Image: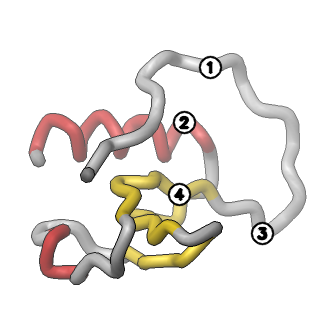
């Protein structure tokens, strides 16, 4: 079953984070390895295995707000 995860609510400004922190959007969770062609139109999609599930992660964002804004954009386009 494919699901889009994330929140669209605005958050308070973030405290300073350690250099190198990256935010990603989880765009799906799968029982078997999905093919990247399922995510046409999206670049920077990585598939990672975690706890027996395969997660599709999108983007590399410097702030949570950037990731949330992109999440809203992805939801409206796909």
Q: Give the Cα distance between marks 2 and 1.
A: 8 Å
Q: Give the Cα distance between marks 3 and 1.
A: 21 Å
Q: Mark 1 points at which residue?
A: 11
Q: Name the residue under label 3.
A: 20
The mark nearer the N terminus, 2 or 4, is: 4
Residue 24 has which mark?
4
Residue 16 lies in quadrant: top right
Left or right placement of residue 75 versus residue 51 in this view: left
Mark 4 or mark 1, which is nearer to you? 4
- Under circle 3, the secondary element is loop
Q: Are marks 3 and 1 in contact (CB under 8 Å)?
A: no
Name the spot of residue 27 as percent of width and height, x first. Answer: 35, 54
- Under circle 2, the secondary element is helix
Q: Give the Cα distance between marks 4 and 3.
A: 13 Å
- Under circle 1, the secondary element is loop
Residue 65 has which mark?
2
The mark nearer the N terminus, 3 or 1, is: 1
Mark 4 or mark 3, which is nearer to you? 4
Q: Give the Cα distance between marks 2 and 4.
A: 11 Å
């Amino acid at each position: 079953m494919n699901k889009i995860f994330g929140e669209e609510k605005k958050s308070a400004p973030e405290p300073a984070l350690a250099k190198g922190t990256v935010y990603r959007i989880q765009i799906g969770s799968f029982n078997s390895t999905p093919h990247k062609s399922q995510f046409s139109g999206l670049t920077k999609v990585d598939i990672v295995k975690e706890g027996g599930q395969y997660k599709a992660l999108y983007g590399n964002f410097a702030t949570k707000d950037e990731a949330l804004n992109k999440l809203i954009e992805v939801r409206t386009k796909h």
